Each structure stands twice: as structure tokens, then as C-alpha cells.
Amino acid sequence: QTLEKLEEAQLAAHAGAITRCLGASTPMASIKVIELLSRLDLPTLQAHRTTCERRISACSSCVQYAAQEVLGWRPKVDDDNQMDGDDDKVPLVIQAGSSMVMAGFSGDDRPQVIFPSVIGRPQLGKGASYSTPVILIGDEAMSE
């Protein structure tokens, strides 16, 4: 909601951050990002076009359709009428650490998703009730 109120100069200043939002959330959020991108001036939009197209190609078909309709971008087609998307695909990087799992796209500054990989439950003594399940996640599980 606050992004929609930004003026064009502010949008241009944050264009890189806005393009990183593509595909990071729900398809509707990505479509809103595409609408914001359509408000950018042409040189700024062209500067971020490669990143945008790469992220849009990994999104659902409704997001790809929105990019085609709003931004006028069409999928690249080579001479044999086959989609030329293999070169634009970005590897997904997943780091499964001892207590956290991090995931994101190669080339990004930081992971897009970080979540704990340790789940446990406390040891209950004799006569303790198991009626209410207690689950510990992350640091809580490590400390028990």
C-alpha cells in the first residue's frame, strides 16, 4: 500500500528493491509489483529489465501474462520457435545449516527465506501429561 503512494522519482530510486519483490510473495503481490514497474520511466525500467524478466519467468503463468499485458514484454523466441528461457534461469541456492535453513536465488544479496531446521519437544518426567502437545522450534529446541 505504501509503495503505491510513491512518486516516480522515489520509485526509480527503489527500482532494484522493487524488482527483487517479484516472485517473492503471492502472485497477486507480484502483479502489484508489475503495476508499480509500469510507472517507471523507460531508461530505469530497461536498466532492470533483465532481472525482472528472469524473476517473472520463474513466476506463475498469471504473473507472466500480467507482465506481457502491462509492460508489453513478450517471451524471447529463438529461430526454431522454441522458448529461449534456459539461459535466463537462475539457480536456487539452499543452505541447510545445523540450526537454520536459508534459501534464495543465486546473485541476490541475501537469502529470501530463513527458517529454523530444528524442531523438538521437551522431555517430560514420570507422571507428566502428554495431553497438550508442546513443540519447540529453533533456538528453543536447541536450549532444551
Image (cartoon, grey):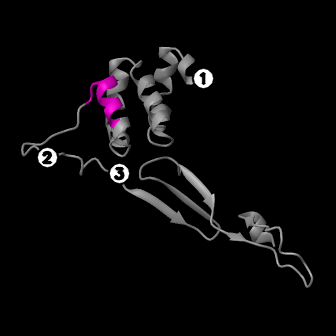
Name which of mark 3 and mark 1 comes first in the sequence: 1
Could you tell me which residue is drawn at 53 percent across and 49 percent down? 112
* Label 3 secondary element: loop
Amino acid of disc 3: Val
Could you tell me which residue is drawn at 37 percent across and 56 percent down? 91
| Residues marked 3 and 1 touching at CB (< 8 Å) | no
Tag shown at residue 52: none
Residue 8, percent from left and from top: 47, 15
Q: Residues within 10 Å of mark 3 (few under 14, many from 20)?
A: some
- Specify the farthest residue to the left: 80
Per the model, the C-alpha gap separating discs 2 and 3 is 19 Å
Name which of mark 2 and mark 3 comes first in the sequence: 2
> In this view of the protein, which residue sits in the foreground, 26 or 22?
26
- Residue indicated by mark 2: 82
Per the model, the C-alpha gap separating discs 2 and 1 is 40 Å
Amino acid of disc 1: Thr
Q: Quadrant of the C terminus?
A: bottom right
Q: Residues within 10 Å of mark 2 (few under 14, many from 20)?
A: few
Could you tell me which residue is drawn at 43 percent across and 31 percent down? 31
* Span of residues in magenta: 64-73
Per the model, the C-alpha gap separating discs 3 and 1 is 29 Å
> In this view of the protein, which residue sits in the foreground, 66 or 97?
66
> In this view of the protein, which residue sits in the foreground, 135 or 144?
135
Q: Residues within 10 Å of mark 1 (few under 14, many from 20)?
A: few
- Residue indicated by mark 3: 90
- Residue indicated by mark 1: 2
